[in-house]
Amino acid sequence: MSVASDSPVHSSSSDDLAAFLETELDSDSDSSSESFPIEEEPEDDAEVSNHRLKRRKLDHLETVDEDEIEEVASVKFSQEISEASSSKLPCQHPGTFGNMCIVCGQRVEEEETGISFTYIHKGIKFHEDEVTRMRDIDMKMLQSQRKLCLVLDLDHTLLNSTVLRDLRPEEEYLKSLTHSLQDVSGGDLFMLEFMHMMTKLRPFVHSFLKEASKMFVLYIYTMGDRPYARQMAKLLDPKGEYFGERIISRDDGTVRHQKSLDVVLGQEKAVLILDDTENAWPSHKDNLIVIERYHFFASSCKQFDHRFQSLSQLKSDESEPDGALATVLKVLKQTHSLFFEDGGEDLSGRDVRSLLKQVRKEILKGCKVVFSRVFPTKSQAEDHPLWRVAEGLGATCATEVDESVTHVVAMDVGTEKVRWAIREKKFVVHRGWIDAANYLWKKQPEENFGLEQLKKQGAEEKSDDDVLQKSRDACYKARDAFYTCLEKESGKKPTEIASVGLLYPKECSLSRTEFVKSCRSSWVKHFDREYCRNKRVQRLLDDGDERKGPMSLPQPYTFKPSPST
């Protein structure tokens, strides 16, 4: 019998499975018979098994009241392991703990051990067939509770974190606004000095989690490491009522640098994903809701090469009622409602992936869009990603204008189609109007995406380019001044420490300070590393005649053939 047969994975959650494994698998045992001690009275195997099950069940139920459903589930789980252990049939090894079958106790080869679920319990793995069985049972439990699964990313989705050393001078005011870690329930900005970082929760996140938990079993899935994931979970869910042990980090994934639902105990047709990065889910894009990135700290903008100021630099933040999470919550409610509409018991034909597409098609429903000089001339318009996105949002796309056209998407005011749209009083917008609808999950005001805004944006970008070029020139000038000082003062004793092992005399301290101030820290390390490498090469070339010139490789005749045996 399967270890998970009829086991309500989410009714007691993965926490119940973890709790059971803590008590059963960590006990002192070398065989399955020793894991379940028995009295000496019964003699035959059937009697032993029957007596053991009854005794365990009675002993447990004496302390259980009707409301303790999760403990009863654990008893049922252990009973099934006992039954499987005493069975005469060959064990199918549905799961392992430390390469030992959790049913029969036999050692199992590593390649046969299946999928790791280390976020539930360290060292636990389940065979793919067993995972499928568990998901099927879980699906029944979820349907009875009218719930689905929701997998949530952390960074730039629910919160934004920065390393303290990356705080800009204009962000120093944030240190006086942080909330105490002793009681995180009422705060949204936290200084985590033991992790050398600061974290800002996204506006509306507490209300979002509270409402979403009524409709979904919630998971965290982050590309951060396990300690970071668990610390962020404490900020988001201090009482542990939303996530439990369903906190998946990059240490728990099965594919490097990617996320996958293979470690989520839920059927794909009942799982939605909320993430800011589409490429993180290459195999599950139909389950994915892509959310606009939350850039609170300046380092976040820098990470993605954005030239605009962060929310902290602007001393602003997202709107709670109209922000990204509030919008996504509406999408989740729509999808959940469609999945469970009519209240029928047979929901086997329902699939969140098709329902999510149905919800998306409502965003630009009724819009007919013509594109003007947006696509390359020789390409097929129907194959362009922007065309497909617009159709996915419910718009009708065309190549020629007519009276039914509502919007002309263009990048230049001088085209014939744009002039036609102006004469006919149609909307003229740039491609950002479609992109914004795609990421914000709602139709955007056309006046915010007119071509005049595009021209203004272009002028601002040119100005930003000029500022960036001036910053680079200042960095290069400060760099050259420092290394010139090093050469000039090469006879002085180096007493100061730079980076990558570079030492310099105190006479160059001022130029070093200006160098560090004018350049990014990563650039400073790069330039120091290049300087050290060039100096080492130069020393090798100057160190005696035998080291001058190019090195020659050994010739074939240098080595004598070994005598044949």
Image: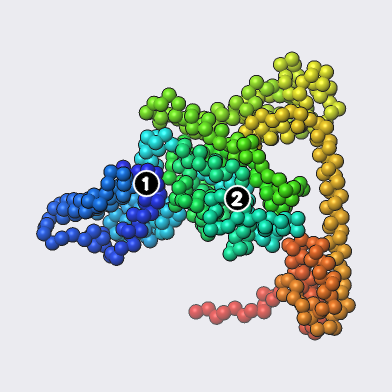
Q: Examine the rendered structure and indicate whether residue 101 appears above or below residue 211.
A: below
Rounded to the nearest angstrom, the CA distance separating label 2 from label 1 is 30 Å
- Please give the label number shown on residue 549: none
Observer-nearest of 29 and 387: 29
Name the spot of residue 119 as percent of width and height, x first: 45, 54
Q: Name the residue under label 1.
A: 12
Residue at horizontal 69 percent and vertical 52 percent from the top: 297
- Whether label 2 touches label 1, CB < 8 Å: no
**Residue 413 falls in image quadrant:** top right
Can you give x and y, in whole percent of width and height, for residue 92 in the image? 31, 50
Give the class, few, some or many, for how many residues have Cα within 10 Å of label 1's Cα (few <14, many ≥20).
some
Q: Mark 2 points at which residue?
A: 188
Q: Label 1's element?
A: loop
Q: At x 74% / y 50%, what residue is drawn?
A: 313
- Foreground of the two, 465 or 446: 446
> Which is in the foreground here, disc 2 or disc 1?
2
- Residue plotted at (60% across, 35% down): 327
- Amino acid residing under circle 1: Ser
Marker count (numbered): 2
The residue positioned 72% from the left and 58% from the top of the image is 172
Of marks 2 and 1, which one's residue comes earlier in the chain? 1
Q: Going by the picture, which residue comes out furthest to the top?
A: 403
Residue 291 quadrant: top right
* Residue 312 drawn at (x, y percent): 71, 50
Secondary-structure class at tag 2:
loop
Q: What residue type is labelled 2?
A: Asp
Residue 150 visible (yes or no): no
Scheme of colours in the image: rainbow
Q: Where is residue 433 in the image (x, y as percent from the top left)?
A: 72, 32
Against 333, residue 192 (above or below) is below
